[in-house]
Every structure is written in structure tokens, then in C-alpha cells.
Image: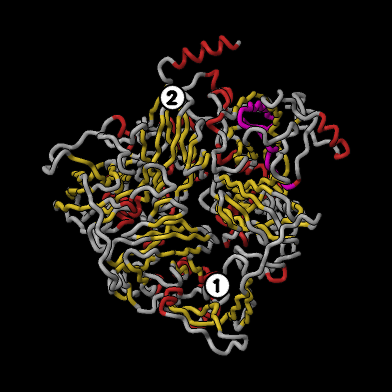
């Protein structure tokens, strides 16, 4: 097979400019892409250039090292593929930048020089079936399947367009960041290197040479933990770069970890070629993430600030297939660190450097004519108790109660530290003598382990005098303010859940509390887990001093996130809702080094929980309380007047649920036998595994209070799957939920967003009981000023919310503005509405696990180890509405339909979902996208006008979730008469 041509010498670069792909005047942009196999070095200097550390990532008998064979996209000048067009060095192994404007046509001529089939699949543009570049069973003709897998030596021409309904909308930046990648097996193709950036702009923003008029510089950066274990070239890399390939165990965990490269554009530890700009330039940063559950990234730009969707920040949150466009006008000269602030990613080398130079006199100057605010802060060593009361304040029982969820963190023994640790804390002093500590007021007691709140206004100068009274070197690094290099507070060459295993004080804590520093204790996994303190301001299990607010007041909540890639938090409020950026919510998501502010106007008196919606964090004690009272004020505002009363009769009933009743799509998709399928570990019932069927509890609706006649689901409701009935209401309504528990466990129904007529305690229904719940729908339950007409919520059982949800008891709820709904509950003017729950159902945490083992496990059940890693993983069902591998029915609509999608996220740390619609874009909030991010406690709504007939893939873009089956198909049927009209139009234009 013909090999890829090498890049011509730099002396011929200007000749290349003359040979750029030809495109018709402002309309057609032509690209010649070749897929080539190359050797790629993640650290070509052999050094950690950030800290000048010694050589690392060396190959050995059972380690590949830093060089891997990869497949990459290269751009060529014409169809001879003889001359490669150079690209900026900082693009790394990313493919060339594809650019287009609204109204343009993109033609990509792809030639595959690699040794296996590949494709090119785009995000954010319009394509027909013959240009999708994605391999999956979609019932399309063979003529439309040639794009699905271009064989070695083969070629295919893809045609994409950027119509008006794919253009940036009013609140979007001028250009939108997208990607293209191979999609025969997307996780393996991308891990092998086949991905590149794509940019679509408003009309008139780029030149013939595809450069933008409105910015000085564009940079494209991919943050990804590139898993070389998934690469098609893994065996070749072992054979080529390990000195003793026969000694390699591909299943060895340490070997797999060594192949996960925490890279920016394919470079680690500062090896990315430096990006240089001038002070005062208008710089556009196009940022995106790709990868697996661990690919939770917070890109932090030291020294400058960014504008992202109209908001000021110095960080950008990125997840698999998340695309962010950030604008920067740098004003702070120097070489600055750009890194992922997720602790373990930072330690593993996800760092680069960018430089701001003084090129002219156009540097913007900030006017600092405000107040100089002085703070005297010291780092002081203290003993910190995560549960000072010694009690779980929700139960009144000891935190060391045997069998309790708190015991593993607070039990003190010869191999457990317990709940008290030596720590360093920022402490404020009255003056520069650092003799007198500044006492905290009663309103500040909730700050806990946090340092003092530093406050300033625009134009002020903050002067911090810092004294280190601790025994380790420390500093203070700020976010969001302007500082010079000498005040940056970060050491590098020119690093929530408090993980006590990473603390400088771990040896001191072991010596002080365990009387040992033995290394074997540090390696014990149970010891490590006992030191991961799931805290709010350093307190667990409701030990945070109570937060008290007044009914009717406007309360500002400020949230901070820190930590590792497991620090995916959904900070949720029971009892009242919040507003963020004009959006109505009752939870906000936090990630390492992200910050958020929410406003609440509480209208519901009582004591309510603040907790992390991420289920394993909730179980581990990330809970606190706040109380709402009248505070002795005058006559309260009158209660809202509720008009319409809507009653639903809902039963909890136990059923046999099959996550994947038909495996034909899954096996055809991967073109392999059942034993080799990715789905086999979840769907096989051999060797002690349970298969696809489980006993579950589900909500189902009945016609009346006799609970004799179930309410049949219509074709519009077929897609709901395991979800309970789709409950709907308008602002000003009352929902009466008559609930009968026909299951064998106590259950309940609790809803997010509504005003429940209780004091924070949801009444449980014992088996056989009937309980009536009243949910009022005040204004604060409905859409905020920046929401769409309706807002998404969920309801579920709250007896044990983690086990109840994983057992199956969850359903969708929508609340709309007054007058927005028809008598059937559908939004007026909307053709179809779909509610989709993306959730890894963890059957290991179901109430019915032992019963399911007895019913579905074959062979000797007494030998089944419920803690076995393979068994535990096999029971994690990566489902959309309870179905895997395109088994979800009912996602059907017609061309031209206006469709609302209500997207729901719940679950654990692994439930980071990036929902991608093939072939269509949508409006999300007030932005254009084709991927929406979901996390535990996130409920989103997107609007779409479907215009592309066909059967299309809808899936989570997280690599492990794709292989785990979190995929569905949706079908757009041609509107009767449109096909004939289109044919006539084509004939008349030809």
C-alpha cells in the first residue's frame, strides 16, 4: 500500500500557500486528508520541562515509554497526496484545522494510508447518510454505507454543509468550536490519534486563506487522558518499544496506568511547543475534551482571565466531547502555566506554557484607583476533626456505629486514623506581627476549614501579607485577579474530597494516631478509602454548623470545588430552589477549581438538607443542613394562590426488567461474536454473571384510586422505558400524588423543584400502604428568566435515595410557564417531547441484589463473590431509560418537527455524561451545540427542529459508556410530500 508522504522542508512553505486546496468563491472549501501511521513522542525533550525534573517515561522490559505508534490525519495540497501542508507545531498530533462559514460547503477527500478501516465523522455541521462517517446499523442502503469504513488504501469523499440552522446563535461567540474524528469504533479510533478541530463561523468572518478577521490568534487545545490501552496499535507498541515484550501482562493495572497519557494535544509535562502572543492581542482559545470517565478537566490559565459565554473566568470545564470557545485579551506579560487543575491530572503532566510578550504600546491598562485592602494571613498547623460532635446529626448515632456508612471514616484503630487529622489552615491575624488571631463572627462559623473570605471591588488592590507558620513550604495562589509573576504563588519553571492520603501530614498523622509509619499500611486500599473525607467546608454527616436564613430574604451561596477527577459534585438544596445566570435549578455542579454563585429567595420554612447529589459522596457523608425561619419579621407575604389541581395515581410495583432484550444491533455494530463483544461482560449470564435481566421496582400510573386499571402508555410515551409517568404542571398548579406501594420495601415519592408540604421529611409508604403527597408549584418552581418555557425536574423514592433509585424508582417532571401547556400536557407549538435518563444503574446497590443472584445466576451460587471486581462491574448497566445498545424504542419524529428533549442525570462519580446527537444540532439555553453535559443532579432541556431524515445515533460520548452500551437510535421520518418537493427542486436547479 502507498505510504504517507513526508512533510516538505520549511523552505517550501510559501510554495504550499499557493497550493492550498481550491474552493469556490466563498462557498466550497476543499480538504484533502490522509490517514497516516506515525511514531509519536509525548515528551520529546525527555524531561518534565515545568519543574526541570529528571528524565521520565523511559521504556523498559514491560513499559512502552513515551513513544507510541499512532494514526493521525494529515492535510495535503491536492488529490496526488504528494505534498503535505504544514500545521502549527502546537497542534501536536491533532489533525489540520477545518474552517467554514455559514452557507459554506465542506468537501473532504479522505484517503486511508493506515492498515485498518477508518472514517471521518464531524460535529456541528449538516451531512447526509453518505457523509456521516459513522459505523453502526442504521438501516441505510449499501450506497450510503461506503462512508462508514474506508478500507486500507481506499478513499471516500465526504460533503458537509453549514446551513443557517447550524450557525452560531445570538449569545454564541463569532465562531463555534467542534471536532471531527474517526467513528468505526470511536473510543479506539480517537485513542489511536484520529481527531482534529473544526471551526464554523458567522458569515464574513474568515478570509480566502481561512484566517479570521475578528481575532489576532486562534489556538486549539485538546485535554485528554489518552488511553493507549484502547489504541488499535497496542500490540505493535508493546512489540516495538518494550525491551521484553513477552513479559508484558496487558491486564496488569500498573501497566495500563503507564499507558494513560495526561496530555494537551498529545504532549505531557510542558512538552507542548510554546504558544506565543502579544499583550493586547485578541486571542480565541478553542478548547475541547475527549476520553473516558476520568476525563473531567479544569483548564486553568495562570496570569490572565477569559470570557466564556459572556462570563469572566480563568478556568474552563471540559468533559468528553465538550467544546468551549474562550476569548482572552492578555495584559500580563510573562511565561504562564496552562494546566488541568484536577489534582491527579496535574501530577501526571497535563501542563503546558504560553507566553505573553510586550510587542507594542497597545497593552490594555487597568485603572486601580480603589481601596487598598490589607489581609494578614498565616498557614498554621492544627488538629482538625471532620465530625466534632461525634454524631451523625441526621440519626443521632455515633459516627463509629458498627455497620454505619460513617464508620469507615471515623473508627479509630491500629490501622485507621479516624476523624481527626493534622492539617494546615489559613488563619487571619489582626496585623503584621501575627500575634493576635482575628476571631470569626457567628456568621462565619460555617467556613470551617476554609481560610478567611477575601473581599474586594473592581478597582481595589488586595495586599496579602503571608506568614508560613507550618513545617512545609506553602503559598497563596489566587484565582480571578490580576497579579505579577512574583505574586503568583505557584512554583514552576520560567498543585471537595479531602484526600488525606495526599496530605503532607500523612506520615505525621500515621505516627501520631497509629503509632506507625509502616509502608504496608499506606498501600492498603481500605486504609486509603478511610482517609478520603467527603466534606463540606471540612465537616461530614451534618456536622457543619447550621446555616440559618430568613424567609423572603435574598441569599447568596458561593460554591468552591477542588480535588481529583472523582470530585464531580452536584451541590443540591432540599426545600427551595436557586437561580444561576437566570436559570432555575435546585443544584449546581462543581468540579476541581471551579466556582459558582447562586441566589435563593427561600419561601419554605423548615430545616432542609444541603448535600452532594453524587450518590457515593452522599453515602460517605457529604451532607449538611440549613434552616429557614421567619426571623421575627412582620406579616409574611401572602402565599401564592393555586388554581389547577392535577391528581396522579402512581404505584410502585416489582417487575422483571431486561436491559437488552435484543442483542442483534450490538453484535452487528461491532461485527463480532457475542464472546468478543464489549457488551458481553454486562449481558452474559455465564460464569456466575447475572445477564441482562433483573428484578426491579418501577413507578407506573393508574386510572384512579382503586389501582386496578393501569394507564396504558401511548406511542408518545413508549420511549420512557423504566421511568415513571411523565408528570407535568404549570406555575400556579397543585400536584396531588396518590401513591400506593405494591412492592416489598418501604418507598416514597419525592420531587425536585416543587414545594412539598412537609418540613424536610418525606413520608414513607410501607408495603401495601397508600400515601398522598401534595406538591405546590409556585413561581420559583418554574422557569427562570433565561430558561426555556419549561424546566426539567425529577422525582424518586427518598427512603434510601441511592438504593431506591438504583432499584428503579425514578421518573421525569416538567414545570412550565402559565398557559404554556395544552390539555394533554404537551407544550403548545411543540410536536414531540422526550425525557431521557442517562444513568449507570448500579445493580450492586439495588435492594434486590441477593434475590437477583438467586434468580438469574447459573451454577453454584454459593461460590459467587459479591465483592469480586468482575462481578461488580458486570452489574453496572450503562442505560438510557433503562435500555442498552439501541434497545430503547419510540424515539420517532417527522422532518420539520419542533422537538423538546428533557435530559436527566443522576448517579455516581462515573455518571459524567456528554449526550451527543448525530446529524442534528440544538439550542441549549441560548447557545448552539450538538453535545450537552449531564452530571448527577443535572436536569437540562434542549430544543431542536429536526431536518435530516434518517435513523441516527444518540449516545453518551464518554468512551467507556459507548462500549458499555449507552446508545440509542432516533428516527426522523420524511414529512409526506417533502421528498417529492426536494426531488423537483433538484431537477429544476440542474
Judged from the image, the secondary structure of the residue bearing numbered disc 1 is loop
Judged from the image, the secondary structure of the residue bearing numbered disc 2 is loop
Q: Does the magenta stretch include residue 97?
A: yes
Q: State the quadrant of the N terminus.
A: top right
Please indicate, yes or no, whether residue 5 appears anywhere in the rendered image. Answer: yes
Residue at which label 2 appears: 895
Q: Is residue 464 left or right of residue 41?
A: left
Q: How far apart are marks 1 and 2 (CA)?
A: 55 Å
Mark 1 and mark 2 lie on one chain; the one further toward the N terminus is 1
Residue 885: name its quadrant. Answer: top left
Measured as percent of width and height from the top left, residue 716 is found at: 31, 31
| Residue drawn at x 42%, y 48% as measured from the top left | 785
Q: State the quadrant of the C terminus.
A: top right
Mark 1, Cα crowd under 10 Å, few <14 / some 14-19 / many 20+, is few
Measured as percent of width and height from the top left, residue 360 is found at: 81, 55
Measured as percent of width and height from the top left, residue 180 is found at: 61, 36
Can you name the residue that lies furthest to the left here? Answer: 706
Viewer-closest of 316 and 530: 316
Q: In this view, does 819 lie to the left or right of 201?
A: left
Q: Is residue 315 above or below residue 115?
A: below
Measured as percent of width and height from the top left, residue 429 is found at: 56, 84
| Residue drawn at x 21%, y 59% as measured from the top left | 763
Q: Is residue 312 left or right of residue 854?
A: right
Residue at which label 1 appears: 454
- Closer to viewer: mark 1 or mark 2: 1
Q: Is residue 963 above or below residue 770?
A: above
Q: In the rendered structure, which segment of residues is drawn in magenta?
A: 90-119
Amino acid at each position: 500500500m502507498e505510504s504517507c508522504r513526508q512533510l516538505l522542508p520549511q523552505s517550501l512553505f510559501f510554495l504550499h500557500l499557493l497550493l492550498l486546496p481550491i474552493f469556490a468563491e466563498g462557498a466550497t472549501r476543499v480538504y484533502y486528508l490522509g490517514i497516516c501511521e506515525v511514531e509519536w513522542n509525548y515528551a520529546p525533550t525527555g524531561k518534565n520541562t515545568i519543574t526541570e525534573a529528571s528524565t521520565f517515561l523511559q521504556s523498559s522490559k514491560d513499559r512502552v515509554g513515551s513513544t507510541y505508534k499512532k494514526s493521525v490525519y494529515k492535510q495535503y495540497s491536492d488529490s496526488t497526496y504528494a505534498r503535505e501542508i504544514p500545521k502549527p507545531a502546537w497542534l501536536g498530533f491533532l489533525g489540520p484545522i477545518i474552517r467554514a462559514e455559514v452557507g459554506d460547503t465542506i468537501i473532504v477527500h479522505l484517503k486511508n494510508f493506515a492498515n485498518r478501516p477508518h472514517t471521518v465523522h464531524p460535529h456541528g455541521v449538516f451531512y447526509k447518510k453518505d457523509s456521516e462517517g459513522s459505523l453502526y446499523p442504521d438501516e441505510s442502503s449499501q450506497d450510503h454505507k461506503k462512508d462508514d469504513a474506508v478500507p486500507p488504501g481506499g478513499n471516500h469523499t465526504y460533503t458537509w454543509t453549514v446551513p443557517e440552522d447550524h450557525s452560531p446563535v445570538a449569545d454564541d461567540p463569532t465562531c463555534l468550536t467542534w471536532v471531527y474524528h474517526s467513528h468505526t469504533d470511536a473510543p479506539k479510533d480517537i485513542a489511536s490519534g484520529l481527531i482534529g478541530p473544526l471551526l464554523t463561523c458567522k458569515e464574513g468572518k474568515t478570509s480566502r486563506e481561512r484566517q479570521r478577521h475578528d481575532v489576532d490568534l486562534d489556538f486549539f487545545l485538546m485535554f485528554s487522558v489518552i488511553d493507549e490501552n484502547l489504541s488499535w496499535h497496542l500490540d505493535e507498541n508493546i512489540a516495538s518499544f518494550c525491551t521484553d515484550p513477552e513479559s508484558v501482562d496487558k491486564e496488569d493495572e500498573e501497566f495500563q496506568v503507564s499507558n494513560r497519557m495526561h496530555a494537551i494535544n498529545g504532549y505531557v509535562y510542558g512538552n507542548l511547543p510554546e504558544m506565543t502572543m502579544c499583550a493586547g492581542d485578541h486571542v480565541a482559545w478553542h478548547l475541547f475534551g475527549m476520553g473516558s470517565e476520568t476525563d473531567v478537566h479544569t483548564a486553568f490559565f495562570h496570569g490572565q482571565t477569559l470570557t466564556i459565554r459572556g462570563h469572566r473566568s480563568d478556568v474552563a470545564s471540559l468533559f468528553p466531547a465538550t467544546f468551549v470557545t474562550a476569548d482572552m485579551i492578555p495584559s500580563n506579560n510573562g511565561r504562564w502555566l496552562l494546566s488541568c487543575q484536577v489534582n491527579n491530572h496535574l501530577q501526571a503532566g497535563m501542563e503546558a506554557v504560553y507566553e505573553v510578550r510586550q510587542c507594542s504600546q497597545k497593552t490594555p491598562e487597568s485603572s486601580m484607583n480603589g481601596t487598598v485592602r490589607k489581609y494578614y494571613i498565616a498557614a498554621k498547623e492544627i488538629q482538625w476533626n471532620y465530625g466534632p460532635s461525634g454524631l451523625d446529626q441526621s440519626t443521632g448515632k455515633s459516627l463509629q456505629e458498627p455497620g454505619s456508612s460513617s464508620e469507615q471514616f471515623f473508627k479509630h484503630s491500629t490501622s485507621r486514623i479516624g476523624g481527626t487529622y493534622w492539617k494546615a489552615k489559613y488563619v487571619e491575624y489582626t496585623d503584621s506581627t501575627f500575634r493576635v488571631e482575628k476571631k470569626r463572627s457567628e456568621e462565619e462559623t460555617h467556613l470551617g476549614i476554609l481560610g478567611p473570605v477575601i473581599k474586594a471591588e473592581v478597582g481595589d488592590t488586595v495586599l496579602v501579607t503571608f506568614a508560613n507558620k507550618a513545617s512545609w513550604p506553602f503559598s497563596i495562589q489566587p484565582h480571578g485577579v490580576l497579579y505579577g509573576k512574583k505574586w503568583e504563588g505557584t512554583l514552576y519553571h520560567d498543585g471537595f474530597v479531602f484526600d488525606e492520603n495526599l496530605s503532607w501530614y500523612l506520615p505525621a498523622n500515621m505516627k501520631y494516631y497509629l503509632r506507625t509509619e509502616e509502608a504496608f499500611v499506606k498501600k492498603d486500599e481500605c486504609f486509603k478509602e478511610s482517609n478520603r473525607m467527603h466534606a463540606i467546608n471540612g465537616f461530614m454527616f451534618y456536622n457543619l454548623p447550621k446555616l440559618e436564613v430568613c424567609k423572603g430574604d435574598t441569599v447568596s451561596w458561593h460554591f468552591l470545588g477542588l480535588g481529583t477527577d472523582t470530585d464531580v459534585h452536584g451541590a443540591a438544596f432540599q426545600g427551595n430552589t436557586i437561580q444561576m445566570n437566570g436559570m432555575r435549578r435546585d443544584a449546581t455542579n462543581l468540579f476541581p477549581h471551579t466556582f459558582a454563585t447562586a441566589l435563593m429567595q427561600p419561601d419554605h420554612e423548615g430545616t432542609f438538607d444541603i448535600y452532594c447529589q453524587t450518590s457515593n459522596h452522599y453515602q460517605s457523608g457529604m451532607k449538611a443542613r440549613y434552616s429557614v425561619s421567619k426571623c421575627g419579621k412582620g406579616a409574611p407575604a401572602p402565599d401564592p394562590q393555586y388554581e389547577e389541581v392535577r391528581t396522579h395515581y402512581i404505584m410502585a410495583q416489582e417487575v422483571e426488567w431486561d436491559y437488552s432484550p435484543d442483542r442483534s444491533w450490538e453484535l452487528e455494530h461491532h461485527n463480532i461474536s457475542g464472546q468478543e463483544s464489549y457488551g458481553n461482560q454486562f449481558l452474559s449470564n455465564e460464569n456466575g454473571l447475572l445477564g441482562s435481566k433483573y428484578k426491579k421496582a418501577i413507578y407506573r400510573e393508574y386510572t384512579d384510586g382503586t389501582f386496578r386499571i393501569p394507564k396504558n402508555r401511548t406511542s408518545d410515551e413508549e420511549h420512557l422505558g423504566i421511568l415513571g409517568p411523565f408528570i407535568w404542571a404549570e406555575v400556579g398548579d397543585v400536584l396531588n400524588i396518590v401513591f400506593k406501594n405494591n412492592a416489598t420495601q418501604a418507598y416514597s415519592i419525592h420531587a425536585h423543584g416543587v414545594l412539598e408540604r412537609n418540613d424536610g421529611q418525606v413520608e414513607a409508604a410501607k408495603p401495601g400502604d397508600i400515601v398522598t403527597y401534595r406538591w405546590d408549584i409556585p413561581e420559583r418552581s418554574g422557569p427562570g428568566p433565561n430558561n426555556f418555557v419549561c424546566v426539567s425536574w425529577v422525582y424518586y423514592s427518598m427512603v434510601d435515595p441511592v438504593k431506591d433509585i438504583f432499584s428503579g424508582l425514578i421518573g421525569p417532571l416538567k414545570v412550565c410557564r402559565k398557559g404554556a401547556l395544552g390539555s394533554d400536557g404537551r407544550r403548545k407549538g411543540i410536536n414531540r417531547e422526550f425525557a431521557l435518563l442517562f444513568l449507570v444503574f448500579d445493580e450492586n446497590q439495588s435492594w434486590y441484589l441477593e434475590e437477583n443472584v438467586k434468580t438469574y445466576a447459573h451454577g453454584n451460587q454459593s461460590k459467587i463473590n459479591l465483592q469480586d471486581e468482575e462481578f461488580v462491574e458486570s452489574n453496572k448497566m450503562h442505560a438510557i431509560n433503562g435500555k442498552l445498545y439501541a434497545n430503547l424504542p419510540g424515539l420517532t419524529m417527522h422532518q420539520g418537527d419542533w422537538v423538546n428533549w428533557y435530559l436527566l442525570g443522576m448517579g455516581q462519580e462515573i455518571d459524567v455524561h456528554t449526550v451527543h446527537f448525530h446529524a442534528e444540532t440544538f439550542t441549549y439555553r441560548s447557545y448552539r451545540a450538538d453535545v450537552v453535559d449531564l452530571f448527577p443532579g443535572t436536569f437540562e432541556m434542549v430544543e431542536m427542529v429536526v431536518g435530516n431524515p434518517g435513523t441516527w445515533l444518540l449516545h453518551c460520548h464518554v468512551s467507556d459508556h459507548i462500549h458499555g452500551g449507552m446508545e440509542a437510535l432516533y428516527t426522523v421520518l420524511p414529512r409526506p410530500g417533502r421528498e417529492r418537493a426536494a426531488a423537483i427542486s433538484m431537477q429544476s436547479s440542474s
